[in-house]
Amino acid sequence: MREQMGGERPAKVEQVAAALAALGMYDGENTPKEHSEEAARLGGPDSLSSDGAPVSLITEYSTTARPDRRIVEVYDSDAYLGDDEALQRSRTRVVAGNGYHLYLHSLQPDIEVQVTIRVWDTPRKPPEDTEGTVPVSLESETGQLVVNQVTFGPAGMMDLPRPGVYDGHAAWSGRDATAAYYDTCLQRAVDERWGPEQIGAAWKQCSTAEQYTLDLWFVRESEPEDKDEDEDDE
């Protein structure tokens, strides 16, 4: 990794944009708010914690998943058993879990959604440009998370920086617009007598991306298992 020379502070995103504009490599049309949002998305110097301190992105993983039965699951690879109570809560909270198993609740069951998991070095403010956000907590004793489709199985797996308990928040966008597009397609399919191929093509042509993002940060190690309880279970 390159060291900064002479103790200089890294350039802010606005300074970089101005320099590129002067060189004719950028038209300068983005607003300061857009610069800040993009820097925050990438974990740059404008990504801040709740107290205003810079936050660095450690790792990021993204995959698409079909929300079969209007659900996508995220859980530790050793905690695949479901939780009906958490599943029901997700229908009103959009994202809910039991500490090991998260449910992401879509409003439609067929159009693929984007699931992104980001791990930060310290707590981070929730994003502002979303349809909604809720706090979450997820424990992974294996250090590996699964993004799962209820009927079709795993859509992907992510290795966390370390096993343990992660706090954070879940955010979503494009959920309502994708559901509206889905309902419109269903109505047209009936009115115009679409076949399966035409319906499948319509799902892929949705112009809005339904996105779920988990922003997490490590808080502590997992509690060691109680040997006495293990022996009682046997």
Image (spheres, helix red, strand yellow):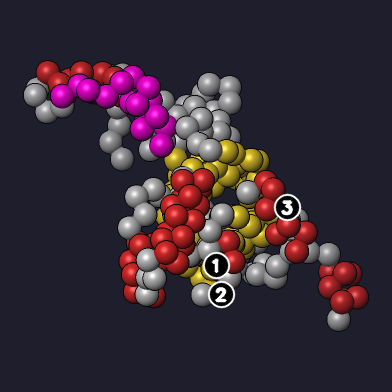
The kind of residue on which mark 2 rests is: Thr
Q: Which mark is residue 68?
A: 1
Residue depicted at 51% across the width and 70% down the height: 154
Dots 1, 2 in contact, CB < 8 A: yes
Residue in front for this viewpoint, 220 or 113: 113
Residue depicted at 44% across the width and 55% down the height: 184
- Location of mark 2 (residue): 151
Helix, strand or loop status at disc 2? loop
Q: Within 10 Å of the Cα at label 2, are there few (<14), some (14-19), or many (20+) other Cα atoms?
A: few
For the residues marked 1 and 2, what is the alpha-carbon distance in whole angstroms?
A: 6 Å
Q: In this view, does 161 lie above or below 43?
A: below
- Location of mark 3 (residue): 89
Tag 2 or tag 1, which sits nearer the N-term? 1
Q: What stretch is highlighted in magenta?
A: 27-41
Residue 97 on image: x %, y %:
69, 54
Name the side, left or right, on which 222 lies relative to 229. left
The kind of residue on which mark 3 rests is: Arg
Q: Is residue 181 above or below residue 203?
A: above
The kind of residue on which mark 1 rests is: Asp
Tag 2 or tag 3, which sits nearer the N-term? 3
Residue in front for this viewpoint, 226 or 24: 24
Residue depicted at 64% across the width and 56% down the height: 102
